[in-house]
Image: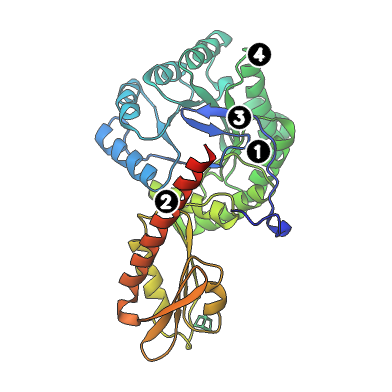
């Protein structure tokens, strides 16, 4: 249960957006903020792409995007959609036919900018295909590919130009009586992205897809995304997010979740609270946390675990976590359950023991959640 009512400094008031469906996943309104990623395999390599989609879904991705650059990819898309456990977004650039093919192939959403696909007739055809196949659209404005007339008007990519571009694309969809869309205004510059998203949030009630594009490698891109997306999410802006990293899509999903978890916006898996360790540590905190992160990857139940090197902060942190371990002396430490001191455990057995305790707790939480849901029915 959220205790935010007694901790008002933790509240985030989400911008009110209307809700759309991306396949089975609601986006906007009061829906949980969804996490997306994108495959980087050749779409025509169906087996490799499906494996990547499945790995991303297993890591928690709610939606996965796949590039559809040519007709062979459209054909492959149909098979990928059929085997995917999550809705697939087809990434389309310029080719209106790919948009139509993707909608026909079962894509749950087209990432396409209607202003960039040619004549009004072509635009109408794509919109009709989306409508016929219950497919939403994501307008994806990118600072690096703004329309020429906007670059001429503003002189360079800037938040005003990005929002203008987005609103132009929105107008095209609305003129065609199509409202099943969300929108993003991405830039690789954190300031530009944040300013553009803030303006966009004022200008439309469409669900917003957040992202800092081309953020960089795993470490630097994570930091950049956490700053950019974190600030926007904290302001209540954003209905779905994608972290763009030059790294495995699974890493993007993990980072996306960690950003949402840090802000209390989504919970999944074990949230490990651990100290940086110092000379006082009663066991090797860093190695233990590395091992536990790997061993607990399979747990999806939201719960918390504190792994603290010594009694300076251990008992205090354990008070607020489901399972805790605090280093002591003489090769052993104290295990805490539900915030209470429980029993001693030797350092050399503690990893296996903590994994067991977490698994048991996860099972218990699942049973309690199920029972509460049944009682509510
Ligand atoms: S909790 Fe203890 S071991 Fe960990 S950093 Fe603080 S003083 Fe050091």
Question: Given the current orientation, which residue lies at the most extreme front position?
Answer: 375
Front-most of residues 237 and 221: 237
Q: How crowded is mark 1: few (under 14 residues within 10 Å), some or many (20 or more)?
A: some
The vertical placement of 319 against 121, above or below, is: below
Q: Earlier in the sequence, mark 1 or mark 2?
A: 1
Q: Is mark 4 on a helix, strand or loop?
A: helix
Q: Identify the residue at image location x=31%, y=70%.
A: 352
Disc on res. 367? 2
Q: Earlier in the sequence, mark 1 or mark 4?
A: 1
Q: Is mark 1 on a helix, strand or loop?
A: loop
How far separated are the C-alphas under marks 1 and 2?
Answer: 52 Å
Q: Identify the residue at image location x=65%, y=47%.
A: 232
Q: What element carries label 3?
A: loop
Q: Identify the residue at image location x=38%, y=42%.
A: 57
Q: Which of marks 1 and 2 is in front?
A: 2
Front-most of residues 21 and 361: 361
How far separated are the C-alphas under marks 2 and 3?
Answer: 31 Å
Question: Given the current orientation, which residue lies at the most extreme bottom position?
Answer: 330
Q: Nearer the viewer, mark 3 or mark 1?
A: 3
Q: What element carries label 2?
A: helix
Q: Nearer the viewer, mark 4 or mark 2?
A: 2
To which residue does mark 4 refer? 175
Q: Can residue 101 be seen in this view?
A: yes
To which residue does mark 1 refer? 157
Q: Identify the residue at image location x=52%, y=24%.
A: 136
Disc on res. 344? none
């Amino acid at each position: 249960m959220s205790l935010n009512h007694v901790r008002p400094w933790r509240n985030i008031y989400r911008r009110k957006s209307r809700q759309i469906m991306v396949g089975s996943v609601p986006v906007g309104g009061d829906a949980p903020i969804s996490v997306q990623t994108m495959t980087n395999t050749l779409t025509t390599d169906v087996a490799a792409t499906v494996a990547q989609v499945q790995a991303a879904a297993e890591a928690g991705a709610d939606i996965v995007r796949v590039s559809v650059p040519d007709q062979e990819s459209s054909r492959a898309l149909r098979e990928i959609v059929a085997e995917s456990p999550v809705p697939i977004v087809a990434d389309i650039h310029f080719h209106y036919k790919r948009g139509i093919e993707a909608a026909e192939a079962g894509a749950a959403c087209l990432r396409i900018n209607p202003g960039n696909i040619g004549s009004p007739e072509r635009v109408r055809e794509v919109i009709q295909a989306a409508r016929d196949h219950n497919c939403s659209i994501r307008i994806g404005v990118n600072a690096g590919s703004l329309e020429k007339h906007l670059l001429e008007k503003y002189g360079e990519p800037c938040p005003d130009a990005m929002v203008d571009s987005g609103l132009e694309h929105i107008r095209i969809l609305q003129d065609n009586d199509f409202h099943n869309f969300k929108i993003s205004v991405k830039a690789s510059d954190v300031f530009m992205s944040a300013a553009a998203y803030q303006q966009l949030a004022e200008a439309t009630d469409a669900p917003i897809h957040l992202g800092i594009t081309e953020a960089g490698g795993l470490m630097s891109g994570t930091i950049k995304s956490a700053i950019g997306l974190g600030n926007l999410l904290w302001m209540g802006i954003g209905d779905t997010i994608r972290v763009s990293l030059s790294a495995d899509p699974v890493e993007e999903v993990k980072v996306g979740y960690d950003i949402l978890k840090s802000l209390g916006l989504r919970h999944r898996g074990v949230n490990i609270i651990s100290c940086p360790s110092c000379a006082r540590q009663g066991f090797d905190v860093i190695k233990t946390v590395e091992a536990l992160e790997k061993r607990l990857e399979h747990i999806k139940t939201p719960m918390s675990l504190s792994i603290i090197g010594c009694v300076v902060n251990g008992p205090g942190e354990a008070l607020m976590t489901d399972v805790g371990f605090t280093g002591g002396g003489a090769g052993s430490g104290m295990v805490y359950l539900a915030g209470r001191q429980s029993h001693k455990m030797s350092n050399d057995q503690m990893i296996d023991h903590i994994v067991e305790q977490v698994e048991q707790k996860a099972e218990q939480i699942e049973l309690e959640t199920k029972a509460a849901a049944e009682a509510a029915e």
